[in-house]
Amino acid sequence: MKALEGVKILDFTHVQSGPTCTQLLAWFGADCIKVERPGVGDATRKQLVDVEGADSLYFTMLNHNKRSITLNTKEETGKQVLERLVKECDVLVENFAPGALDRMGFTWERIQELNPRMIMASVKGFGPGPYEDCKVYENVAQCTGGSASTTGFLDGPPTVTGAQIGDSGTGLHLALGIVTALYQREKSGRGQKVLAPMQDSVLNLCRVKLRDQQRLEKGPLEEYSQFGKGIPFGEATPRAGNDSGGGQPGWIVKCKGWETDPNAYVYFITQAAVWKNVCDVIGKPEWKEDPEYATPPARLNKVAAIFDTVEEWTKTKTKLEVMDICNPLNIPCGPILSMKELAEEPSLRASGTIVEVDHPERGPYLSVGCPVKLSDSEVEVERSPLLGEHTDEILGDVLGYSADEIAQIKQSGAV
Ligand code: COA
């Protein structure tokens, strides 16, 4: 048995944010029915195509374990089928532009009329307010949610991150909202609306930067290397380069091979509790008792110089050697792993976080599997559906249409 077995999801999502959410629910065992426009489908099917004629990796990697039905929900017969789906399913998940569902005739009031137990979950770019009608993509959310203004180097422009915190990050927030609403429904018997705005989700992930904004109003942020360099702070939380977001100084330093390998670097943390071990490792045992270095406050104005010394040592080792030496001494450090290295990492393959999936149109490809492990609900990653692959099956088995009725629906052009 899977954790969400028996939960039916009407998956009206597209691109990345919504599909991330429903893919996770499908991995946990929900029956995820993806509704797509006939002949077109989710736009990502044909974006960044790498195998001519096949669904793109963009689509396949975000839509595992789902079933696909095509349905023109702006046409009368299509609307009737969608009504049946609303009555049959537990959760409707959508991330259309604001108002699209209303324009289709499926307002929250109408959905409640059809199915009072329905949980309607939406990703939107913004919550209620001046920007609520805007269309939003990943980087717009990163910029409006506080991430870009606090990412990058002090002397450079705002920077977006590679982690898709706007899309996938919001999808994760939405998934939690849905499961919580399902739990509440157990007691209340009622559905509810769940909204995860992308701006809010990014801001939630940037919580520590709002922490720093308020601390900044009381004085300079001493743990930022900017402080040690004597560069004055402005009014807002600045970009902190590779400074750690917590109270333990950290930085990315070069390792052996950095001249030719763009990822021969390691994140090194001079955690106060293991300072003496750090001194031994980097060949500065005299710093252990030197009052200029022995305590965190004494080190604050020379953090950058300390990392220069750390780097002199790390440049003599590969990033994995640094990790092997530091870990037994409880010195936290993170080698910069490339996507190539991650794809080949045996432990991630063994845990199912990197999976190889076969696909009829494109052959085998790699994907990120389910990153959350439940001990009593195992995940088997199944390939994404072809466009409309399950239309007949869903009309017949899920919605109970007869063969004649299915033929009529097809004749109407609704699927
Ligand atoms: N049958 C008929 N029409 C369908 C349909 C179907 N099965 N599925 C979608 N449509 C229609 C919609 O109703 C909408 O029509 P309308 O504009 O006449 O109301 C139209 O297709 C386009 O939908 P829309 O969501 O506006 O797509 P878009 O490509 O113009 O915009 C986004 C894409 C992502 C910018 C937008 O959907 C958005 O802002 N979503 C919310 C935030 C979000 O999730 N962003 C991140 C995406 S990773």
Image (cartoon, helix red, strand yellow):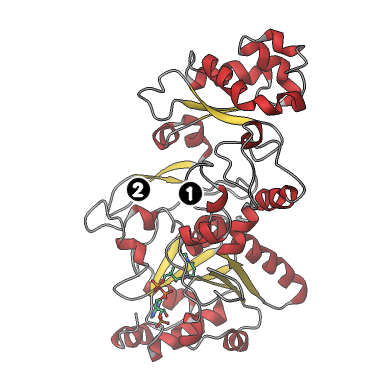
Question: 10 Å neighbourhood of mark 2: few (<14), some, or many (≥20)?
Answer: some
Q: Which residue, as the protein is rendered here, is positioned at the far bottom?
A: 76
73 sits left or right of 22 in the view: left
**Left or right: residue 375 compared with residue 321:** right
Q: Residue at x 71, y 78 (%)?
A: 190
- What residue is at 38 percent from the left and 58 percent from the top? 59
* Residue placed most toward the observer, 293 or 184: 293
- Does 158 sit above or below residue 405? above
In the rendered image, the vertical position of residue 105 relative to residue 381, given as above or below:
below
Q: Secondary structure at mark 2?
A: loop
Q: Does the closest atom of ligand 1 sit within 8 Å of the Cβ of label 1?
A: no
Mark 2 vs ligand 1: CB below 8 Å: no
Q: Quadrant of ligand 1?
A: bottom left
Name the quadrant of the N terminus. bottom right
Query: Which type of secondary structure does the marked residue at label 1 adopt?
Result: loop
Which label belongs to residue 358? Answer: 2
- Alpha-carbon span between mark 1 and mark 2: 36 Å
Camera-side mark, 1 or 2: 1
Q: Nearer the viewer, residue 274 or 372?
A: 274
For the question of whether residue 332 can be seen, the reply is no
Q: Which residue is mark 1?
A: 159
Binning the other alpha carbons within 10 Å of mark 1 as few (below 14), some (14 to 19) or many (20 upward) gives some
Which quarter of the figure is the C terminus placed in?
bottom left
Residue drawn at the location 39% of the way across and 86% of the way down = 74
Q: Quadrant of residue 117?
A: bottom right
Image quadrant assignment for residue 45: bottom left
Front residue of 252 and 37: 252
Residue 54, percent from left and from top: 27, 57
| Contact? badges 1 and 2 (CB < 8 Å) | no
Counting from the top left corner in percent of width and height, residue 56 is at 32, 56
Q: Is residue 204 left or right of residue 88?
A: right
Question: What amino acid is labelled 2 in the image?
Answer: Asp
